[in-house]
Image (spheres, rainbow, N blue to C red):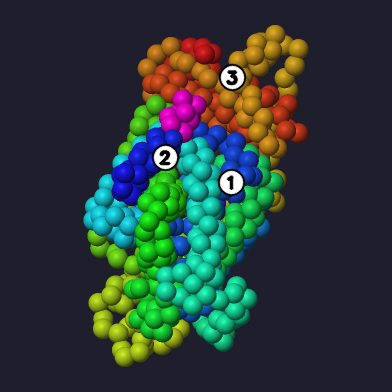
Amino acid sequence: MDSYQIFLALLTVYLAGLVSIGWYFNKKQKSVTDFWLAGRRIGPTGVGFSAAASWITAGGILAVIGFYMLLGMGSIWGFVAPNIIALLLIALLVGKIKNLPAITQPELLEQRYGSSIRMPIALVIAVVMILFAVADVQGLAMVLQIFYGLDKIYAVALIAVVVSIYVTLGGLSAVVWTDVIQFTILAIFTIAMAFAAVGTVADGGLGTTAISNSELFGNVPDGWWNPFSIGLPLVLIYILAIIPGWISEQDPWQKVWAARDEKSARKGMILGAFMILVVFGSCAVIAIALNAIYPEIAAMGFPAGMALAEPALLTFINERFAASPLLITLSAIGLTAAAMSNADTFATSGGSNLSRDIYQRYIKPDATMKEMLVVNRISVLIIVLGACAGTFYIQGIIEAIHIATFIASASYFFPLMGGLYWKRATRQGALVSMVVGGVSQIGLVLLDYTMEAPPMAATYLEGVHPALMSHGVILGMSLSAVAFFGVSLMTKPSSRVNLAPFFEEEAQALARYEAREINEMDPVYSSFLGNVEEKVTGERSHLQLNLRVSDTLSWKELVEKLKSVSPAWVTPTGQDSVYRLTHGDMLSCVTVTRGSGDRDIWLKAEPRLETVGRQKKELFTAYEELKNVMGQKGVSLDFY
C-alpha cells in the first residue's frame, strides 16, 4: 500500500471512532442543556483538553512554526502568548461566568440589557465562529495538498461531512471527548516532530552538517530568544488587539458553563493553558531545527519567506520520511486531528447562536426539545458549510483567525465584559457600542484589502501609522469603548431584574418572593418529591420535574397567565423560558420550559447543595401555581 492508501484506511478507522463517540452521546441527550452544555457534567480534564484543542489549529501550528523560523520568540505575541494568557484570564473570571444562567452569550446579554441586543450579537458571533473555522479547513487543505497532491475541495468535504456528523449527533459532549483524543494525537505528533527534526540535524540528514544539540540551540541568531524583540509598543498593540477578543470568545465560556463546578472549570482552563504551552514549545524546537535544515528560508526574512516557512514542516516530513509511508500518514492524521478539534468547537458554538438565539427566541419560542435538537443539528451544519465556503475567499490561515478576533474585540468585548462588572452599563450603550465597533472594524478590514499598501508596509493602514496595524483594531475598539461608556452614562440605568444575576446587592433586593410554608410530612408533598429527578453535579443539584398536560398546550397563553398570577414569574430572555425569580442566583430559580413533545412541560432548578431543601419547596410552589393556572383552563397535569 502507498502512503495515500494507508492514510485513507487509518482515516476511516479514526473517523469511525469519532462518529461512534457522537452516536454514544446522542443516546444520552434529553434537553438543549445536554446538547449544548454536556449536561454541565464535564470535569477538569475534559475542560482542559477541550480548551487546549479548541485553540490549536492545524494551520495555526504550521503558521506558528513559520513565524518562529523567521522572527524568533518575538512572534509569540501574534498567536502563541494570547492563547495562553486568554485561558489564564478566563480561569480568573470563572467565578463570575459559571453561575450565570445562560447557554450562549447572546442569551446572557439579553438578560443583562434586554431583547434588542440578542439577535445582532448572535449573528456577529456566528460569523466570527465561521471565520475561525476557515483557518482549520485551510490548514487541512495545505496538509492534503503537500502530502498527497489533493485539491482543497477534499479538505472541505472531509471537514463538512465528518464534523457535521459527530457534532450533530453528540453535541458538546461529543466535542469535548473527541477533543481529548484529538489533542492527545496532536501533542504526540508535535513532540515527535521536535525529536525527529533535532535528530535529523544531529545526524547530518537531508544534506545538513551534523552538529550537536548544544550547537544547534546555541547558534541561533542574536535576539531569537528575546520575546520583546519586536519592540514593546508592538507587543502592547498585539495584546490589546487579540486578547480582548479571545477572552470574550463564546466557545471557552461554553466550556466553563459545561464544567461540573467552578473548581473544575478553573483547573481545566489552567490545564489547557499549560498544554498549549507544551505544544507551542515543541513548535519552537521544530523551528530551530528547520532553520538549520532550510537556511535559505530564514535568509529570505519576513514576510517574504512566510510562503515557504509556513509549509516547511510538511516539506520536512515529506523529505525525511519519504521511505516510510506509514510515518507520513501518521503525521497527516495528527494534523487532521488538529483541524477537526477546532472546527467542531466553532461549529457547536456558532450553531447554538443560530438555533437558540435566533430560531427559538424569535421564530418559534414554543419549540419543543425534540424540535430544538433537530434545529441544533441543522445549525451546526450551516456553520460548517459556511466555513467551508469561506476558505475559497480567505487564503491566509492566521489572517482568518486575526480578522475574526478583531471583529469580536471591536464589536462585543465592551458590552460583554462591561455588563459583567459595570452596573451603570445600559442597553443603549451596549447596542451602540456593538454597532459602532463592529461596523468600523469591518470597514477597516475592507479598507486594508481594497487600498494598495505603501512601500515597506504590510497593509495600507499600517503604512498610514503603526498604531493602525492589525487592520486598525485599536481604533475600532476605541470607538466601541467611547460609544459604550458615553451612551451608557447618558441613558437610563438598567432595571433591577436585569442587574440581579450579575450584582449581588441587586439580587438581595429581589429576594422577597418566598415559597410558602410547606409541611414536609404532607403526603402530597412526599408524593411530589417522588417524581422529582435529582442529580448532583459538583456544587449544585439538578432538579427536574417532567409534566404532561391533558390537552393541547398554548405556550404563549400559559406564560402570560403565570406572569399575571405572581410577580415572581418573569421572562428575562424571551418566552421560551419562564423564571420564578425569587433571588439573584438564577440558576437556582425554578424555570419552566417546553418538554420533548407538544404536551410536555419541564420544571427545572439547579440550586447549590446547601439550598436544595429550600428549592425543592420552591419547585413544589411553582408546580402548584402551574397546576392552578392549567386548572382554570380545564386542563390537568400528570407526572411522567
Q: Whole-percent x and y of residue 143?
A: 35, 58
What span is colored magenta in the figure?
Answer: 20-29
Residue 527 shown in magenta: no
Indicate the quadrant where residue 66 lies: bottom left
**Residue at image point 47% right, 28% down:** 24
Indicate the quadrant where residue 382 lies: top left
Neighbours of disc 3 within 10 Å: few (<14), some (14-19), many (20+): few
Which kind of residue does numbered mark 3 sit on? Glu
Q: How far apart are marks 1 and 3 (CA)?
A: 39 Å
Q: Name the residue under label 2.
A: 14
Which kind of residue does numbered mark 2 sit on? Tyr
Q: Whole-percent x and y of residue 90?
A: 60, 57
Q: Name the residue under label 3.
A: 624
Q: Taking 405 as reference, is 250 above or below it?
A: above
Q: Mark 1 points at which residue?
A: 47
Tag nearer the camera, 2 or 1? 2
Neighbours of disc 2 within 10 Å: few (<14), some (14-19), many (20+): some
For the N terminus, the image quarter is top left
Q: Distance between the residues labelled 3 and 2?
A: 51 Å
Residue 23 shown in magenta: yes
Q: Taking 237 as reference, is 120 above or below it?
A: above
Decide which of tag 1 and tag 3 comes sooner along the chain. 1
Q: Distance between the residues labelled 2 and 1?
A: 22 Å
